[in-house]
Image (cartoon, rainbow, N blue to C red):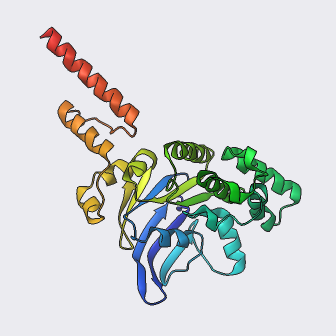
Amino acid sequence: MTAPLLALCGVDYTYPGGVMALHGLDLTVAKGRKLAILGANGSGKTTLLLHLNGTLQPTRGEILLSGQPVRYDRRFLTDWRRRVGLVMQEPEDQLFAATVGQDVSFGPLNLGLTIGEARERVAEALTALQINELADRATHTLSFGQKKRAAIAGILAMRPELLALDEPTAGLDAHGVAHLLDALQQLHAAGATLVFATHDVELAYAWADQVAIFHEGVVLRQGETAAVLADIEVMSRARLRPPLLLELAQLLREECGDEVWRPPRSREVLLAQLRERLQDDGNERCCG
């Protein structure tokens, strides 16, 4: 069996002052999946993400990268952060160069690539995030959504195997969310593993392959999205409500009595099922 790309085993983390943020946490990140870390605000999701690329070191426990224990020396951390890129919730925390192009080139140049190779990486990342026209723009003139995509491009230019994002859709309007998710979906289709922390159950349901329910520094349950989000007991413990789309789909299933049923993951599919059901009911009334 192939080892997970990342695994956290019995991880504790205590902040200075004795504030314990993670408690015996176990989590696996399988290569090529989209994993949602789902929990209420203050549950420790950001602290967890900061462990995924070595920004924070556990107080206790072990982290495995491709099955091997991680280290915190400079050489290992450099390789680790090349493989695992982290995008924080506030893009201003990661944008510091004068222009977008300069900012995105920082990572590749820091890896020791030539100027020509760095330019190629910058062009590739800007294209993937659909922001080529922003290459020469001053970073302080960007909108919030543009800053978010520029920050992701800066990490993407390092060609990480895993991209971890903290509340990726926070602060974006509906158009911005759709644009960003489309870009991330294309990255995933190209082979990237994605981990995103969110308190948005609707986003997790519609978009993640797997979900880890997070509460007070502990993963209550990790598994396939629909099964986990339908676990009323776990969701209640985490102070979360099941996604409305899943609840409506379950009502439809009960009405239809379909035992071989897969819950729809988008409103479009659910609406199509509802229309089909209404049409069938109408035909039965006409024929009756």
Is 42 or 265 nearer to us in this picture? 42
Q: Which residue is rendered at x = 62% and y = 68% of the image? A: 93
Q: Residue furthest top?
A: 287
Horizontal side of residue 213 vs 123, given as left or right: left
Is 126 or 134 nearer to us in this picture? 134
Looking at the rendered image, the quarter that the C terminus falls into is top left
Q: Residue furthest front?
A: 141
Picture layout, residue 192 above or below residue 87: above
Which of the 4 image quadrants contains residue 101? bottom right
Which of the 4 image quadrants contains residue 118? bottom right
Spot occupied by residue 122 in the image (x, y as percentages of width and height): 77, 53
Spot occupied by residue 17 in the image (x, y as percentages of width and height): 45, 90
Q: Which residue is rendered at x = 77% and y = 62% of the image? A: 98
Spot occupied by residue 230 in the image (x, y as percentages of width and height): 28, 51
Is 156 or 129 nearer to us in this picture? 129
Spot occupied by residue 241 in the image (x, y as percentages of width and height): 28, 55
